[in-house]
């Protein structure tokens, strides 16, 4: 196995960039056990859904591009735990099944959307990369890299003007920090002290290019410094640490103290798109992937909960069986659901139709 060379650039992320580190159970902090178990269940549901969708791509049933976030569950779940939905608004990108589920999006409607069915959250018009759940504050996920960052910034301005006290969250990847709109949005949010959480899931890759081939530093938090936005770099595979940081960021936003940039260091288990590992492309991934799998956010919380006595090993198995059964049922429902009628394009895409 190839060892990870910690260059001076990698050291900007400290040990978080070294997947040989950080395998230990997470520190549980002071949250009540029910809240921690809810986070565990939510991460398990996302993992089960991603694995289920991977299988639907393998069998050819899912025909839209599916970008899977297995391995990154703690980012979505930790941030969602800090939100008050639907008052708080969130926005995602191409890899957003987890964001949708973490805020409470309906599993059946996700699976149906992935199969292009009328019962999908976007009536089968959008597929994996166009998810929406307004009843949970998720106003959209868009595959144009960086596209929803300014929209989230606008939603924060709207919250300010409406006096709702809400914050908005933009989930995006390290690749999106290479887009101009990211910098324009950070600048505006800082200048106007808007209540935005800029949540960068730094999984070290944009498609098949490692960040070391794209940027002079592995940490994207330096952009927050430049824009005078408060920032934290967090272990994105530690759901408790993510939730703590997100709570601080939400409190800052609600208090009128402006935006926060959260850099959540994580890694995706599947390749860029689809159900393969992609071990044969991109630098270092073949050596890194087994190590990153040992930094599994789900196992690290599971072990901590069992060690604390909050859960028995049997409870963990029951939780896993329950989410697996939920996903199987959702897949079956989606298979049996109808495709949209031909006139649905006119109804939902081109005229004033609403959901
Ligand atoms: C503006 C734009 N440029 C390029 C693409 C092609 N593209 C889709 S996803 C992606 C990688 C984005 O990487 P990152 O933001 O780090 O997200 P990740 O895939 O790692 O979750 C690219 C380049 C796109 N969809 N939009
Ligand atoms: Mg990335």
Image: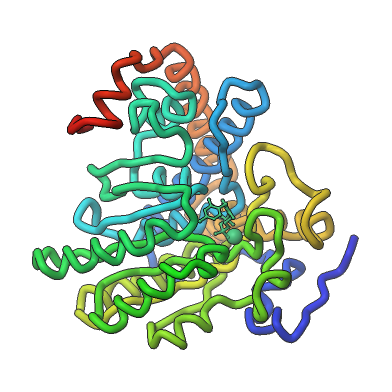
Q: Residue at x 74, y 44 (%)?
A: 277
Residue placed most toward the observer, 261 or 21:
261
Give the vertical position of 329 relative to 122 (above or below).
Answer: above
Give the vertical position of 240 relative to 187 (above or below).
Answer: above
Q: Is residue 276 left or right of residue 336?
A: right
The type of colouring in the image is rainbow
Q: Is residue 115 left or right of residue 275?
A: left
In terms of image quadrants, where is residue 203?
Answer: bottom right
In terms of image quadrants, where is residue 198?
Answer: bottom left
Q: Is residue 80 visible?
A: yes
Q: Is residue 8 left or right of residue 130?
A: right
Q: Quadrant of ligand 2?
A: bottom right
Q: Residue at x 64, y 38 (%)?
A: 274
Can you say which quadrant of the picture contains the C terminus? top left
> In the current view of this chain or complex, which residue is farthest to the right?
1
Give the vertical position of 117 relative to 315 (above or below).
Answer: above
Residue placed most toward the observer, 350 or 63:
350
Q: Residue at x 34, y 47 (%)?
A: 140
Where does the image place residue 55, in percent across and percent down from the top left?
63, 28
Q: Residue at x 56, y 26 (%)?
A: 63
Can you say which quadrant of the picture contains the N terminus? bottom right
Where does the image place residue 352, in percent across and percent down from the top left?
18, 33
Q: Is residue 30 visible?
A: no
Where does the image place residue 165, in percent across and percent down from the top left?
15, 67
Number of numbered tags placed on the structure image: 0
């Amino acid at each position: 196995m190839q060892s990870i060379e910690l260059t001076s650039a990698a050291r900007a992320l400290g040990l978080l960039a070294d997947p040989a580190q950080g395998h230990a159970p997470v520190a549980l902090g002071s949250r009540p056990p029910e809240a921690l178990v809810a986070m565990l269940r939510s991460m398990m549901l996302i993992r089960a859904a991603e694995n289920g969708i991977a299988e639907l791509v393998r069998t050819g049933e899912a025909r839209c591009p599916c970008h899977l976030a297995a391995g990154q569950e703690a980012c979505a779940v930790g941030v969602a735990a800090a939100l008050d939905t639907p008052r708080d608004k969130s926005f995602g990108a191409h890899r957003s099944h987890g964001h949708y589920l973490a805020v409470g999006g309906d599993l059946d409607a996700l699976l149906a959307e992935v199969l292009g069915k009328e019962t999908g959250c976007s009536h089968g018009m959008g597929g994996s990369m166009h998810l929406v759940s307004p009843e949970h504050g998720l106003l959209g996920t868009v595959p144009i890299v960086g596209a929803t960052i300014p929209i989230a910034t606008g939603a924060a301005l709207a919250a300010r003007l409406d006096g709702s006290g809400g914050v908005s969250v933009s989930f995006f990847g390290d690749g999106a920090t290479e887009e101009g709109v990211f910098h324009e949005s950070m600048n505006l949010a800082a200048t106007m002290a808007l209540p935005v959480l800029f949540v960068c899931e730094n999984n070290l890759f944009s498609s098949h290019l490692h960040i070391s081939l794209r940027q002079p530093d592995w940490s994207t938090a330096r952009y927050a410094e430049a824009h005078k936005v408060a920032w934290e770099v967090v272990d994105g595979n530690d759901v408790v640490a993510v939730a703590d940081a997100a709570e601080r960021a939400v409190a800052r936003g609600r208090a009128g103290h402006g935006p926060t940039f959260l850099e959540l260091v994580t890694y995706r288990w599947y390749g860029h798109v689809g159900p393969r590992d992609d071990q044969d492309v991109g630098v270092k991934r073949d050596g890194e992937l087994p190590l990153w799998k040992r930094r599994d956010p789900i196992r690290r919380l599971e072990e901590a909960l069992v060690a604390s006595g909050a859960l028995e090993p049997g409870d963990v198995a029951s939780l896993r069986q329950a989410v697996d059964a939920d996903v199987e049922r959702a897949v079956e429902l989606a298979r049996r659901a109808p495709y949209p009628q031909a006139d649905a394009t006119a109804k939902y895409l081109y005229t004033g139709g609403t959901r």
